[in-house]
Image (cartoon, rainbow, N blue to C red):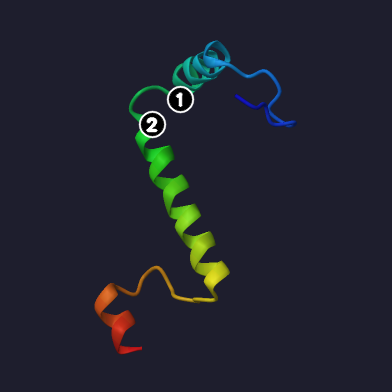
């Protein structure tokens, strides 16, 4: 398996350690909220890259009418 230059020697143990630290800092209930926010941010970024400038308050039906 090839190692990427910026990743170096990150293995399973390091990833597991980072995941446990995140779990300790944020707790089990907060992580799904963080992932939801991250997903919305990625979706917004992709829409921005496509050139779509749609307000989040507009629902899907109103988008079709525009």
Where residue 16 sits in the image (x, y, percent)? Answer: 49, 15
Where residue 23 sits in the image (x, y, percent)? Answer: 44, 20
Q: Quadrant of the C terminus?
A: bottom left
Where residue 5 sits in the image (x, y, percent)? Answer: 75, 31
Q: Are marks 2 and 1 in contact (CB under 8 Å)?
A: yes
Q: Residue at x 29, y 82 (%)?
A: 62
Q: Is residue 57 left or right of residue 19?
A: left
Q: Secondary structure at mark 2?
A: helix
Residues at marks 2 and 1, CA–CA distance in whole angstroms: 6 Å
Most extreme residue toward the left, as rendered? Answer: 61
Residue 8 quadrant: top right
Where residue 4 sits in the image (x, y, percent)? Answer: 69, 31
Residue 33 quadrant: top left
Q: Mark 2 packing: few (<14 Cα in 10 Å), some, or many (20+)?
A: few
Most extreme residue toward the right, as rendered? Answer: 5
Give the camera-side residue of 36 and 14.
14
Give the camera-side residue of 57 and 64.
64
Q: Secondary structure at mark 1?
A: helix
In this figure, which residue is indicated by the disc labeled 2? Answer: 30
Is 11 drawn above or below residue 6 in the view shown? above
In this figure, which residue is indicated by the disc labeled 1? Answer: 26
Is 34 drawn above or below residue 46 in the view shown? above
Q: Residue at x 43, y 49 (%)?
A: 39
Number of numbered tags placed on the structure image: 2
Most extreme residue toward the bottom, as rendered? Answer: 65
Q: Mark 1 packing: few (<14 Cα in 10 Å), some, or many (20+)?
A: few
Is 66 drawn above or below residue 30 in the view shown? below
Q: Is residue 66 left or right of residue 54?
A: left
Residue 6 quadrant: top right
Q: Quadrant of the N terminus?
A: top right
């Amino acid at each position: 398996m090839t190692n990427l230059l910026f990743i170096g020697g990150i293995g399973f143990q390091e990833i597991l350690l980072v995941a446990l630290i995140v779990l300790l800092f944020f707790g089990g209930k907060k992580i799904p909220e963080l992932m939801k926010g991250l997903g919305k941010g990625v979706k917004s970024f992709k829409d921005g890259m496509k050139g779509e400038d749609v307000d989040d308050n507009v629902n899907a039906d109103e988008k079709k009418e525009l």
